[in-house]
Structure formats: C-alpha cells, structure tokens
C-alpha cells in the first residue's frame, strides 16, 4: 500500500476538489447564502445552508468586512444553517478575536442543533454570546 494514500489532504487536494465542485450542482454559491441587514447600531448577518470548507471563505470575508466597519454589535444568524463543519468553528473563533480587538460585540443566534451541537461538543459555546433568536441577540 502506498504511504501517500494515508496522508491528510493538503492544499493541492483541496484546490483540486474545489475545481471539481465548480462544475457540479453543489457549488459553494448553491451550498450557502449570506445577507447582511443593518438594524440601528447593529448588523445582522443571516446565513443559510451548509458551512463547510467550500463556504467558509465567503463567511470569513463577510464577517471580517462587517466587523471592520465597526458597528456596535454583529449578530450572526445561524438559524437556517443545516450543516456546520469544523472550518465554520474556526471561522467563528477568528471572528470573535477580530471583534474583541475592534471593540465590536459578536452575538450568535443559532437555535438549530446543526450549529449548537458542534459548539457544545468543542466547548466553544461558553466562549460566545449565544442566543435563541436574533431579537434577543439584538438586546445588547
């Protein structure tokens, strides 16, 4: 058996996978959608679909841009997320650190099990302000 078969995916494998997915009906644009809405001194980023290695770059970019605009609070609405991979958790940690450094509050509104379960299993739920819905998260 070739030892290379057992090594973890490297950047080249990921790039090849992404190139393959570009022509498939499940491309990243179809896997997840993002929309931002300004509410008073806050911004609500609504996420719908699957958050995985194909869609986290867009999530990371959107969160960074919103946090860098320095609203009082960014509410990340994850209620319509059906799948949440470890790359999404990593993106949340990066966003939390950026928000803290920028003086911006980051609140998560995520009643779905698809998001709450990974946060709980990893212990990250205790490191975020997690709310049951957007309305409660906006009461900062």
Image (tube, helix red, strand yellow):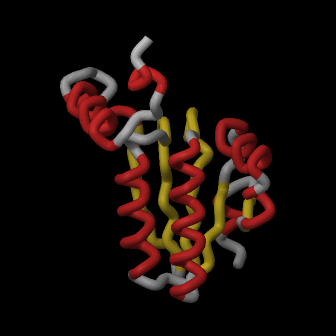
Quadrant containing the N terminus is: top left
In the rendered image of this protein, does residue 49 appear above or below residue 103?
A: above
Tally the marks.
0
Foreground pick, 15 / 119: 15
Quarter of the rendering containing residue 92 = bottom right
Quarter of the rendering containing residue 101 = bottom right
What is the x, y in percent for residue 71? 49, 82
What is the x, y in percent for residue 80? 56, 41
Q: Is residue 31 left or right of residue 92?
A: left
Name the residue at 62% across, 78% down: 105
Q: Residue furthest top?
A: 1
What is the x, y in percent for residue 25? 28, 21
Quarter of the rendering containing residue 135 = bottom right
In the rendered image of this protein, does residue 137 appear above or below residue 29?
A: below
Name the residue at 53% across, 49% down: 88
In the rendered image of this protein, does residue 32 appear above or below residue 100?
A: above
Name the residue at 78% across, 48% down: 120
Foreground pick, 131 / 64: 64
What is the x, y in percent for residue 67? 46, 76
Foreground pick, 82 / 88: 88
Q: Is residue 117 left or right of residue 84?
A: right
Name the residue at 56% across, 82% down: 104
Foreground pick, 82 / 11: 11
Quadrant containing the C terminus is: bottom right
């Amino acid at each position: 058996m070739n030892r290379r078969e057992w090594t973890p995916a490297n950047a080249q494998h990921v790039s090849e996978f992404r190139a393959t997915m570009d022509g498939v009906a499940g491309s990243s644009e179809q896997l997840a959608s993002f929309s931002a809405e300004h509410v008073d001194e806050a911004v609500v980023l609504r996420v719908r679909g699957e958050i995985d290695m194909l869609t986290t770059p867009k999530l990371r970019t959107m969160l960074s841009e919103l946090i860098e605009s320095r609203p009082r609070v960014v509410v990340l609405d994850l209620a319509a997320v059906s799948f949440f991979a470890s790359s999404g958790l990593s993106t949340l940690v990066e966003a939390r650190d950026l928000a803290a450094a920028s003086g911006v509050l980051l609140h998560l509104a995520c009643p779905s099990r698809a998001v709450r379960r990974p946060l709980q299993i990893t212990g990250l739920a205790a490191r975020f302000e997690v709310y049951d819905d957007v309305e409660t998260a906006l009461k900062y």
